[in-house]
C-alpha cells in the first residue's frame, strides 16, 4: 500500500506522466478556492503523496502519516462532488472512468484503517504483557 502511494506520488513529480494529474489539479483548485497557483498544486500533491508512501513503508511517524493520509483521502473523494459532471454519467449514479478511478481508493482507505487499528491496539497497555513494538518496524 505504501509502495503504491510512493509510486503514484513520484509519478506526479514528472509533468504529463500521471494519468490523474489533470483531475487532481482541477479538484484541488476548486477545493482551495483558487488560492493556490495551478502550477504549485501538482508538485505539492507529489510531495504529499510521496511522504505518505514513505511513512507507510517505513512506519516512521505512522500516526502523523495516517492522519495526513485520511485528510488527503477526504480531498480525493471530494472530487466526486466538486467535479460531479466528470465523475458521473449524466443523471445517473453510474461513475465515469474518472469516477471509478476515484472510488477505487476506498480499498486504500480500508487498508489504512487496518493499519491505524493495529497501531492503536499496539499503543494500548496490556496488563502483564510487555508493550508491543511499534507497527512498521
Image (spheres, rainbow, N blue to C red):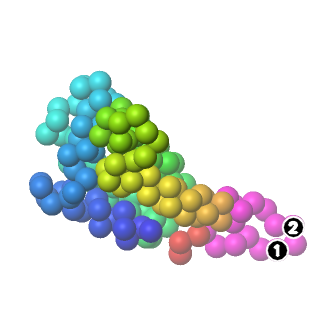
Label 1 residue SS: loop
Does residue 10 belong to the magenta stretch?
A: no
Check disc 1 and report the residue beneath it: 129
| Number of marks in the rendered image | 2
What residue is shown at x 40% (from left), y 34% (from top)? 91
Is residue 42 visible to the viewer in this orientation of the structure? no
Q: CA distance from mark 1 to mark 2?
A: 6 Å
**Magenta highlight range:** 120-134
Q: Where is residue 117 drawn, in percent x and y? A: 66, 60
What residue is shown at x 61% (from left), y 63% (from top)? 114
In the image, 9 versus 124, the foreground residue is 9
Does residue 131 belong to the magenta stretch?
A: yes
Q: Where is residue 102 drawn, in percent x and y? A: 39, 51
Q: Where is residue 36 drawn, in percent x and y? A: 23, 31
Image vertical order of residue 57 relative to residue 67, above or below: below
In the image, 45 versus 130, the foreground residue is 45
Is residue 129 visible to the viewer in this orientation of the structure? yes
In the image, 45 versus 28, the foreground residue is 28
Q: Are marks 1 and 2 in contact (CB under 8 Å)?
A: yes
Check disc 2 and report the residue beneath it: 127
Image vertical order of residue 121 relative to residue 103, above or below: below
Image vertical order of residue 13 relative to residue 39, above or below: below
* Picture quadrant of residue 6: bottom left
Amino acid at each position: 500500500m505504501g509502495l503504491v502511494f510512493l509510486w503514484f506520488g513520484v509519478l506526479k513529480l514528472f509533468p504529463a506522466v500521471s494519468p490523474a494529474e489533470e483531475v487532481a489539479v482541477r479538484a484541488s483548485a476548486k477545493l482551495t478556492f483558487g488560492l493556490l497557483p495551478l502550477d504549485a498544486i501538482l508538485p505539492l500533491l507529489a510531495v504529499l503523496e510521496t511522504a505518505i508512501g514513505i511513512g507507510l513503508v517505513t512506519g516512521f511517524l505512522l500516526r502523523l502519516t495516517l492522519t495526513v493520509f485520511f485528510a488527503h483521502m477526504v480531498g480525493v473523494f471530494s472530487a466526486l462532488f466538486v467535479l460531479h459532471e466528470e465523475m458521473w454519467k449524466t443523471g445517473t449514479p453510474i461513475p465515469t472512468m474518472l469516477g471509478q478511478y476515484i472510488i477505487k481508493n476506498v480499498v486504500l482507505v480500508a487498508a489504512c484503517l487496518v493499519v491505524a487499528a493495529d497501531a492503536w491496539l499496539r499503543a494500548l497497555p496490556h496488563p502483564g504483557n510487555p508493550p508491543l513494538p511499534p507497527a512498521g518496524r
